């Protein structure tokens, strides 16, 4: 698996028109050598889907200053490990998870400083994320538990127009708290998400070949 630097350059060029947005390189299923290569090229913002896989890979880079995000679902039995591995967790989606994080956080010092709430913007049964109608309640629970919620994250339905869902999340954010960031857009729709106000695009497959 090699890095497609031509695609990376194209994405970075696109981002020049959106100074409020950043590129997060999704390194799930990528090996340590590929991550090392990207770090040596100056990249430091990475996203991983699985706690255990991320732990095995990124323990090799403990002496580097990186910004590692969990973008996949988090099981409550992996909370302690996740809180000591990731700088940011983007997949807060239920009260039980919030309470478990708060319990660990109140007992010991953790690495995780920031959290995003994942919104099931298409209301799909098979997807993680809080339903839009339940977002405000979960947000208030997070605030009461002193979780530093800095944004909202979503994955639009695969078989629908992404723009509709990106705009919906932006409107929801504006009503909830306009200061929250938006983590929207992946390899196939990041350009659309940027035009809809995304602050963080999560790109993986497009830059690996």
Image: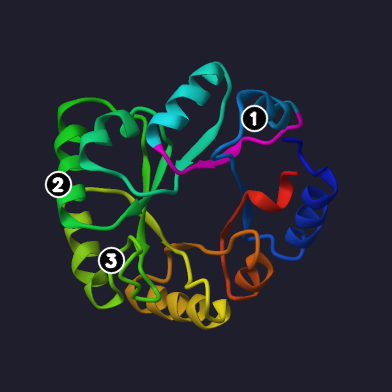
* Callout in the foreground (2, 1): 1
Q: Which residues are magenta?
A: 41-50
- Earlier-in-chain disc, 2 versus 1: 1
Depth order, front residue of 173/30: 30
* Crowd band around label 1 with a 10 angstrom C-alpha radius: few (<14), some (14–19), many (20+): many
Mark 3 falls on what kind of element? Answer: loop
Is label 2 in contact with label 3 (beta carbons under 8 Å)? no
Residue 39 at x, y = what percent? 68, 29
Residue 68 at x, y = what percent? 50, 37
How much space separates mark 2 and mark 1, taking CA atoms? 33 Å
Quadrant in which residue 78 is drawn: top left
Mark 1 falls on what kind of element? Answer: helix
Provide the residue designation for mark 1.
35
Which mark, residue 130?
Answer: 3
Depicted 108 relative to depicted 172: above or below: above
Q: Main secondary structure of the magenta part?
A: loop
Depicted 49 relative to depicted 16: above or below: above
């Amino acid at each position: 698996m090699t890095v497609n630097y031509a695609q990376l350059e194209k994405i970075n060029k696109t981002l020049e028109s959106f100074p409020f947005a950043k590129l997060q390189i999704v390194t799930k299923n990528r090996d340590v050598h590929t991550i090392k290569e990207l770090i040596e090229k100056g990249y430091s913002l990475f996203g991983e889907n699985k706690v255990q896989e991320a732990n095995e890979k990124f323990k090799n880079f403990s002496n580097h200053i990186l910004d590692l995000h969990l973008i996949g679902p988090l099981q409550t039995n992996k909370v302690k490990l996740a809180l000591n591995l990731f700088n940011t967790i983007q997949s807060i989606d239920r009260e039980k998870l919030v309470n478990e994080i708060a319990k660990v956080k109140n007992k010991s010092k953790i690495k995780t400083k920031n959290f995003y709430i994942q919104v099931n913007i298409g209301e799909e049964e098979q997807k993680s994320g809080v339903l839009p109608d339940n977002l405000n309640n979960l947000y208030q629970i997070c605030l009461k538990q002193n979780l530093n919620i800095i944004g909202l994250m979503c994955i639009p339905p695969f078989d629908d127009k992404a723009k509709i869902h990106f705009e919906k999340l932006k409107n929801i954010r504006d009503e909830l708290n306009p200061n929250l960031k938006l983590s929207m857009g992946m390899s196939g729709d990041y350009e659309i998400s940027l035009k809809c106000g995304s602050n963080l695009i999560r790109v993986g497959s497009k830059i690996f070949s």
